[in-house]
Amino acid sequence: MTLGVALLWLLTCAAGASVAGLVRVPLRIEERAAVAIVAGIELGSLCSLGTTLALGMNSPAVLLGPVVLLLICAGVSFGLGDLRDPWRESLAEVPERWRSRELWPPLALLVAAVVGFSVLFAHTLFVTGQDINAGFSTVWADWSLHATAASSFASGHNLPPHDPIFSGTPFRYPFLADYHSGMLLQLGATTQAALAVPDAVLCIAAAMLLASLARRITGSVAVGVVAMSICLLGGGLGASGLWWDACARAGVSAPRCAPLQVASHPADAVKVLRSVPATVADQPRAYDGLLTDTGMQPAGNLQWYTPMMAWWLPQRTFVHGFAIALAVLLLVHAGLARPPPAWSPFVVAGALAGLLPLVHVHTLIALGLTLPLVAAVRRRPEWLGLLGVTLVLAVPRLAQIARGGHGVDQGPFGSNAFPYLEPGWKWNLDSDPGRIVSLSTNGLGGVASRIVHVFLTPGFWGFWLLNTGILLPACAVLLGTAAMRLARPMAAEEERARPADPMIPDALALLCAPFMLLFLIANVVIFQSWDWDNTKLFAYWQLAAALLVGAWVVRWWRAGLWRAIAATVALASVLLSGGLVMLRQLPWTPADANPGSFTWASHDDRVLAGEVEARTPRTAVILTGGRPNDPLLTLAGRTAVMGYPGWLNSYGTDFGTRPDDVRAMYTGCATNASSCPVPGLLRRYGVSFVELGGWEKDNQSANDSWWAAHYPVLVRSGDITVYDVR
């Protein structure tokens, strides 16, 4: 670690601690520390964005950001008191909590989270020999975009931000998480560390925040641990495929493996069970359906992949957004627990929520749909403070997003317009290709009829049972029971019979109920071009479901042997698919059983990126072929005329003629130079350099000989040549 990186983390901790010191309601030390981590990273990044916009992307300006945040907090504290006092109060509880062993569970969780997330994120990007490899296929794909954005800030000095994969357009993708990684790159961190370390730190903070939130609501840290396990590994019934794969390994035919047949042939059951460990060690497919061909799906239409593999490891904006959401919920609950006025937690929560348009828009949607319902029940003037601060920070970015395009109905890669209506989400893809409905063609009555039809179809609920197991029915039963308990009027003589310790506390029911509405909305409205991205909203429904199931499971663990066994089996059914997937992906899994590492940047790629970074202007626009992990973007931080079209299409990009123009430039011209359109297109897009290699030949029909005959070579590495076309 370089001195600059260490200094940034030190200043970030100090700035975050100052923000947490503004919260003038009781918080335990682990709560205050977790809020400080989230606030330091996110608000510190925003302040650094401001200082680098003013002073340029350089090390002093990057380091000045957390200092500015610290000074702002110091100024605000003049009316509140010493920023250190709340920390002293939190620390004063530690000796007694240690003696009473109350501190032991949070400390054990902290150790487990540090070890677990450190191991996983150390395996995201790592150097083997002279190559940079990715330990997970989803990281190989998604972190290419994040590295491109981070490198564009550090190496390309992309300020004010423009889109590095679609030159000449504003950067409307939430970029603050990648800007923070760009800060670390600017100070000397490696690409691997700049991307992995902040995410690992925020995952640890999220685990502590969720455990603390659960303890406040239910009185049990164990509820939060169970909930976090579900949020990381929760899945559906895909693990049933393990039985059939074990049957095949044992040589027992599928008909004889059917439950009724096995029950009448115990010898076959024994053979299959003996094959289960070997099948787990050498899994022939992913039991959550991730990156599994349709014919190999273990249990029908699986769309809910293991969260650790689908969100937590690859999707950096989700990790930052989820940590902010948990910090906001914890601060709000801490504020509601105190008699009014208790403005400080709401104001700090508003400052964090206001960053979400720059961090993760789906999290903003989730909080925007759920917190008003909580506010309607728990009416406090402090909600206005949260709303006001949120709007001050969020509105400028929201206005920029609103002014941007929202896709087109007919584009080169199909329709990517959004938002749109898709009742039932992805539950019936094969038999119902007309699942997308439109108000303009179907009318309000037709749309409403379609929605009702879907929600009354057993197959729709079967789809969710298949994908998430017991979570949905458990939510219905647990919340329904709590609602009936709260709604039933009680006579005065019945007050003594009211349960003092209900399975679902009132505060938990109030927190989780709005997220059930989010589940219904996300099953109707698609908020981004790619409908699968609605899982980023369903993740918050899963958070609420995980808390409900966690409260039930922990309660039954304490209620006798048989209930403990039933609760354990129920929890195992939710975690089994994800657990099997992670066993298959662990770094120490033997190579013949592990999907393996994936070359993210070869030695030739790294040499090429270094040469281009050293020999081209920071603002250079490069014609590339749309390779996801293009080293000129991920490592050299240059801007592409058009990057990977799959990402751009999912963001609702209006491509215009750009895809055709890119192909026309790569194709070159015939011998008649007077009518050649390539020079004009190069000038139109401001292209300074052209990258040409195997990817461009295969995907853009690039004519290497034409380019070699007309333009000088800037650098060559491996099979890639970069031409200078200035």
Image (cartoon, rainbow, N blue to C red):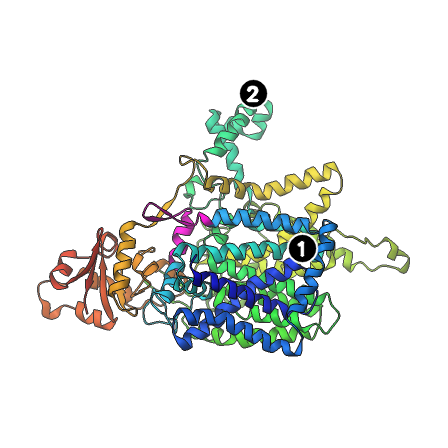
Q: Which mark is residue 70?
A: none
Please tell me which residue is depicted at 51% across the width and 63% down the height of the picture. 10
Disc 1 crowd, CA 10 A, few/some/many (<14, 14-19, 20+)? many
Residue mark closest to the camera, 2 vs 1: 1
Q: CA distance from mark 2 to mark 1?
A: 46 Å
Report the number of numbered marks: 2
Q: Vertical placement of 202 versus 395: above or below?
A: above
Say if residue 463 shows up in the picture.
no
Q: Residue furthest right?
A: 493
Q: Amino acid at mark 1?
A: Ala
Residue 457: tell me if it is visible.
yes
Q: Secondary structure at mark 1?
A: helix
Q: Is residue 109 above or below residue 360?
A: above
Query: Which residue is situated farthest in the top direction here?
Result: 267
| Residue type, label 2 | Ala
Residue 216 relative to residue 451: left or right: right
* Magenta part of the chain: 122-145
Q: Which residue is mark 2?
A: 267
Looking at the figure, which quarter contains the N terminus?
bottom left
> 723 or 48, which lies in front?
48
Q: Is residue 608 above or below residue 161?
A: above
Percent position (x, y) of residue 205?
57, 57
Identity of the residue drawn at 71% across and 39% down: 564
Residue 694 as seen in the image, left or right of residue 18:
left
Does label 2 or label 1 sit earlier along the sequence? 1
Q: Residue at the spot x=42%, y=71% of the render? A: 60
Using the rendered view, name the quadrant where residue 40 is placed. bottom right
Looking at the image, the residue that sits furthest to the front is 3
- Give x and y (percent) for residue 284: 44, 35
Q: Measuring from the top left, give residue 508's x and y in whole percent.
A: 69, 57
- Residue 504 is covered by the magenta coloring: no
Reading the image, the residue beneath label 1 is 214
